[in-house]
Amino acid sequence: MHYVSTRATSASAARNPQLFSDILLGGLAPDGGLYLPSEYPQVTGAELDAWRKLPYAELAFEILRKFATDIPEADLRALTARTYTPEVYRNARADESSADITPLRVLEDGANGKLVLQALSNGPTLAFKDMAMQLLGNLFEYALARNNEELNIFGATSGDTGSAAEYAMRGKRGVRVFMLSPHRKMSAFQTAQMFSLQDPNIFNIAVEGVFDDCQDLVKAVSNDLSFKARHKIGTVNSINWARVVAQVVYYFRGYLAATTSNDQKVSFTVPSGNFGNICAGHIARMMGLPIDKLVAATNENDVLDEFFRTGVYRVRKSSETFHTSSPSMDISKASNFERFVYELVGRDAERTHALFRKVDTHGGFDLSGAPGSDGDEFKLVANYGFQSGRSTHADRVATIRDVADDYGITIDTHTADGIKVARERMQPGVPMIVLETALAAKFNETILEALGADAERPAGFEDIETLPQRFVVMPADVDRMKAYIAEHTGL
């Protein structure tokens, strides 16, 4: 299995084929693009039948072995077995078995269709990001030990990526983590979960700005190839291919658990900000998983919803990005969207590069086919099953109340966005699976507003906000950021 950049010419890709291990520790390709397989491995009906009863760790091995062909299978099997265990994914809900890792719960099954919630938040930081990040931590440690190397992870978070990465990497040999987050724009729980870590290999940097400013800093440092090489910079953001492919697994798990035969289809609704999670669903669909629709649910920062309705991708300025009660989706420049656009324009790397140069110079592009637009590929979006919808603060508060009243469970704000949009897109005969984002306790401010009571907290998180916090505040200045990294790596 070889990998190509979304911005590489076919000639340059042929001269420099990349294997999974070659791109594991990095993020952006040297040309600024994102990595994708040169072609997607296909899954047969016989394989789907054989996978229906597998434990999650075994399913993860079967899927990942199609992408990580240069890692010995015995090693990969050991890595997935160590990652996906009930001990790691301790049961945060008393009524579910932790052995299921990502259990399904049917919320409603009526004339309008079946609505299903896939629990993804039983990991160490109570968010779906753990599903990929725990594997990434083990893969990084394995690769670094094999080559006696070190890695300085430089990433950005709007809330959950940072804590998931830090909990996955804390104490890992040869790894340091420099994590950027928008200053005072995460929930109190999210902030405490990250900033209370005292491990010497963890560095939290609160950036004066919004998430997109943090993400731009990560890209700027990654594009400085000499600095990146000298300071051994890698990333855990969803631009990292290994993280995206790890998320492909729970789409297969959800489908196999919700169906009894391969002639059945399901749809997925995914709370979406950076397009990483739903991109994994797109990859699963390209592999042959019988997915009908992939529905992107956005909050007030509705860049993706606007594109899937109109064909116009219009990035918002920092001053136009809303600070909402589903803060992990407060993103106006979706990094992983480039992977889908690359497919949409027929894997034309030069065209992809030109479109995303226009994002930098003009704030977006237009594929609607209207006079003066940049192209007409929007007409092809339906071929990939994408739909979208938008949710507001009032919507998520109402949805949290409805779900608590109707089903007796408390959902977080992002999952509420997903359920609100899923209800609008449900179809009879096709189960709609909503991917959970996090446990409600991480966003207690809105839960208290919606329900008049605090969200229940799993053991060990009762007083997290009172713990001492360790972080620095910095402006969105790439030179200051490089100096900070250089000072603390000693390289």
Image: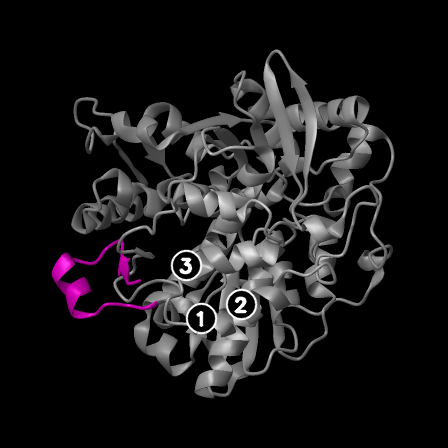
Residue lying at the far left of the rendered structure:
11
Q: Is residue 29 above or below residue 268?
A: below
Using the image as rendered, state which of residue 356 and residue 51 is in the foreground.
51
Upstream in the sequence, badge 1 or badge 3?
A: 1
Q: Which residue was labeled with disc 3?
A: 241
Give the labeled residue for mark 2. 77
3D distance between C-alphas at marks 1 and 3: 12 Å
N-terminal-most mark, 2 or 3: 2
Tag 3 secondary structure:
helix
Residue 31: x %, y % from top left: 25, 63
Residue 27: x percent and y percent?
40, 64
Q: Which label sits in the foreground, 2 or 1?
A: 2
Q: Is residue 238 visible?
A: no
What is the span of residues highlighted in magenta in the rendered image?
1-19
Is 339 on the left or on the right of 410, as rendered?
left
Q: Position of residue 290 (x, y in %)?
A: 43, 34
